[in-house]
């Protein structure tokens, strides 16, 4: 018979400092269990209400004082931007986790009185805001590091028995942009009994020396087909390059990456020596943006479209044709399915689908800028979009529409509806053709 117990604690501080030091960024090299823990935190931040339901909380604000978690007027929690790993924060978090295990104590401050904020500052990280969650679980049975790491995330988010739910507040706080996580296994002794234990320290922060936000994410091979990162699926050594700035980085051992960027729209090229490369367009609007890349996206961009499906073939003698494999985001509140910018004959087009709620048709717009929108309503009969609930595939037939410059645009699409993602939106895996 095995015995299991857990414990956790949090602390937070806000400082106003002045720094003239130049900013230097280092993502670090988190373990797979630490990357998985961050993915769980970012899932919660992207959709706090869904996360609360997942762990069977009555609401995300359960036990929280008014105003501690940002909400809309209807009481629904506001999503928060994702957090990115920072090596200095990870150094502080990992060292504290190891110290607690090695000396068999559990507290934010060491036995000598060293606080989290002293530990963080000693790494060179200058923070405007910082906070810390710590937790552990122990059992006389065996523990798996990743399973324990994810369970500790759930325990910290539920925050049962802790007045004010400070751990959950830290996880969902808008005061932080970066994070360090230290997950380790070891042994502790309680009442003369030795236990296998898993400890985690999460150090949150915002760096005074970094005026930018981050593009971040994870490159992974979705082996279990759950559309989310699972420990062990990460792909290391993938080069991430920003066309407009020349900045680049490579993914860490667990597949994660992060690049600081100013506000703007960027072309992101993701290249792997054997898988090939894929390009994406992202916009930084003053907060962190998460861009995950699946191994299947490399393969899709590298493979030739099957020739037995002429409507999805890109003729080599017609460079104006574009077949693009992309991930669209469907906003449940607005009913808009947005696809990335694509190039047609050297010109960029932004694709949006507006799903009608009162008519059995689909309206979408094609434009290369905000003032040049062409709205198309497909008829209620004939070539109407078809959604197959058995396969979750939405097929949009070929449509020819006039553009403002007198030319025409031919559009067709096949969309694969995926399970809800970590961002809390529905995803459509889309193959569309523009001429």
Image: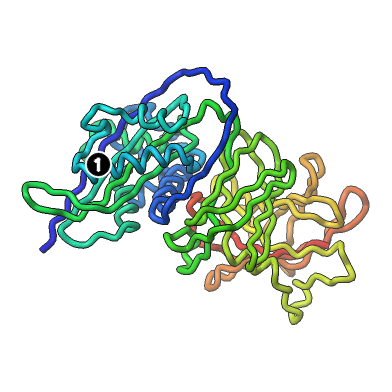
Residue 182 image position (x, y, % from top left): 36, 45
Viewer-closest of 100 and 230: 100
At 73% from the left edge and 74% from the top edge, which residue is drawn? 304
Residue 355 image position (x, y, % from top left): 63, 54
Instruction: Please state if 414 lies on the left or on the right of 403 as rendered.
Output: left
Residue 353 can be seen, yes or no: no
For label 1, the SS is helix
At 80% from the left edge and 70% from the top edge, which residue is drawn? 314
Location of the C terminus (image quadrant): bottom right
At 55% from the left edge and 53% from the top edge, which residue is drawn? 251
The residue identified by callout 1 is 100
Residue 77's image quarter?
top left
Badge count: 1
Viewer-closest of 324 and 424: 324
Residue 65 image position (x, y, % from top left): 31, 28
Circle 1 packing at 10 Å, graded few (<14), some (14-19), many (20+), is many
Residue 348 can be seen, yes or no: yes
Q: Residue furthest left?
A: 192
């Amino acid at each position: 018979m095995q015995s299991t117990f857990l414990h956790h604690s949090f602390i937070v501080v806000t400082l106003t400092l002045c720094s003239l030091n130049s900013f230097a960024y280092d993502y670090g090299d988190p373990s797979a269990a630490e990357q998985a823990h961050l993915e769980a935190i970012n899932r919660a931040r992207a959709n706090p209400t869904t996360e609360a339901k997942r762990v069977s909380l009555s609401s995300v604000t359960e036990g929280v004082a008014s105003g501690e978690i940002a909400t809309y007027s209807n009481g629904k929690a506001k999503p928060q931007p994702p957090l990115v790993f920072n090596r200095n924060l990870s150094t502080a978090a990992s060292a504290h986790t190891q110290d607690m295990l090695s000396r068999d104590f559990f507290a934010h401050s060491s036995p000598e009185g060293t606080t989290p904020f002293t530990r963080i500052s000693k790494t060179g990280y200058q923070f405007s805001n910082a906070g810390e969650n710590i937790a552990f679980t122990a059992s006389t049975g065996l523990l798996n590091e990743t399973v324990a790491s994810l369970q500790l995330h759930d325990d910290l988010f539920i925050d049962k028995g802790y007045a004010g739910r400070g751990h959950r507040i830290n996880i969902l706080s808008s005061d932080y942009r970066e994070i360090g996580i230290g997950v380790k296994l070891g042994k502790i002794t309680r009442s003369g009994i030795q236990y296998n234990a898993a400890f985690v320290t999460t150090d949150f922060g915002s760096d005074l020396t970094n005026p930018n936000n981050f593009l971040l994410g994870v490159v992974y091979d979705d082996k279990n087909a759950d559309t989310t990162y699972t420990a062990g699926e990460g792909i290391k050594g993938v080069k991430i390059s920003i066309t407009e700035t020349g900045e680049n980085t490579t993914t860490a051992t667990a597949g994660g990456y992060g690049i600081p960027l100013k506000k703007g729209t960027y072309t992101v090229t993701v290249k792997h020596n054997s898988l090939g490369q894929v390009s994406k367009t992202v916009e930084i609007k003053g907060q962190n943006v998460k861009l995950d890349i699946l191994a299947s996206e490399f393969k899709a961009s590298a493979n030739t479209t099957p020739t037995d499906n002429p409507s999805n073939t890109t003729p080599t003698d017609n460079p104006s044709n574009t077949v693009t494999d992309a991930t669209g985001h469907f906003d449940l509140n607005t009913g808009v399915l947005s696809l990335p910018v694509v190039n047609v004959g050297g010109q960029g087009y932004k694709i949006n689908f507006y799903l009608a709620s009162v008519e059995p048709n689909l309206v979408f717009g094609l434009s290369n800028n905000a003032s040049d929108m062409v709205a198309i309503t497909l008829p209620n009969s004939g070539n109407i979009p078809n959604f197959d609930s058995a396969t979750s595939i939405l097929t949009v037939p070929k449509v020819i529409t006039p553009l403002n410059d007198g030319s025409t645009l031919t559009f067709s699409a096949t969309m694969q509806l995926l399970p809800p993602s970590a961002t809390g939106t529905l995803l459509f895996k889309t193959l569309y053709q523009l001429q």
